[in-house]
Image (tube, rainbow, N blue to C red):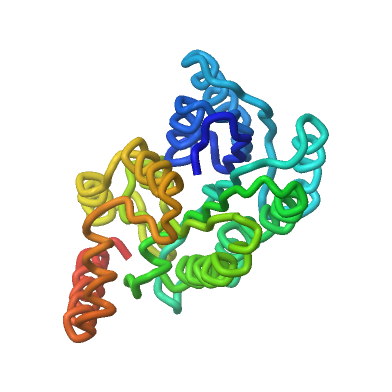
Amino acid sequence: MELAGRRVLVTGAASGIGRATALLAARVGAEVLLTDLDADGLARTAALVEAAGGVVGCQRTADVSDLADVQQLAAEIHGRGGSVDVVMNIAGASVWGTVDRLSHQHWKRMVDVNLMGPIHVIETFLPPMITAGRRGHLVNVASAAGLLGLPWHAAYSASKFGLRGVSEVLRFDLRQHGIGVSLVCPGGVRTGLIDTMEIAGVDQNGRAFRRMQALFRRHAVTPEAAAEAIIAGVSRNRYLIYTSADVRIAHLLQRLCPPAYVAIMRTLNAVLRRALTVAS
């Protein structure tokens, strides 16, 4: 799947992985269609694409968790140039927390944004892709938390494992139409989510939280590195795309050496619990 000359929809394009992926897609010749809730960030991404000589076919704010908003976005995009060729579901939100501290709204927000958001995009943009018969590609950005039992990620993982399930089915359902599917499972990525991450019931101004945040940032890859992995994976029609070696190794251990995987998850849970106790 080469992106040159293709119409590529990127959600979450105002920053982080979304912005980096939009810039790289445009650099290899795609017409990018950009959306995000952040109007200022979206305008900045569009300006960067155009400054680099890329083509922005559409730039529109939209809330992917709102089906009507996604339908309006689709009407505008389809009205300007017909169906898209590549859909990249990158928009997402993150909340961590133990089950006794997560509120119902935390659970609901994760499902609304991280699972129903991509579903809204899929049900709105994929049928026209199928009808157009030009083949294409669907990219769903999940997380390491869509593969692994990471500590305090129950609400987040509910949404990301759900997106993984949708992707697993669609990789076979869409094959007859020549539409490939990629599931991206990033580990740590240095995006704005690091600064805005929420851990329910934990003082986010506390020293322990800041120390953990700094450690996460040091081990995270850049959005540009994640974008390169995504574009390379799409070009090779890979289903599972990792953006860092640690997630690839942990997923391998989970499948091939379950006792080692269990030991690692238990250790991570204990370390996180100890590290954040003083900040709770």
Residue 235: percent from the left, percent from the top? Answer: 44, 44
Is residue 106 visible in the rendered structure shown here? no
130, 240: nearer the viewer: 130
In the displayed structure, 92 sits above or below 45; it is below
Q: What percent of the width, then of the height, locates residue 117? A: 64, 56
At horizontal 26% and vertical 47% (from top left) the residue drawn is 220
Tell me if I can see residue 134 in this picture: yes
Q: How many marks?
A: 0
Quarter occupied by residue 41 = top right
Please tell me whether residue 129 is drawn above or below residue 30 in the rendered image.
below
Placement of 271 over or under 76, stated as above or below: below
Name the residue rendered at 80%, 51% in the picture. Answer: 68
* Residue 2 image offset from top left, x and y in percent: 49, 38
Residue 53 or 276: which is nearer the viewer? 53
* Quadrant that contains the C terminus: bottom left
Q: Residue at x 24, y 68 (%)?
A: 250
Task: Name the spot of residue 274 as percent of width and height, x first.
Answer: 20, 70
Toward the viewer: 32 or 208? Answer: 32
- Residue extending farthest to the bottom is 259
Image vertical order of residue 81 relative to residue 130, above or below: above
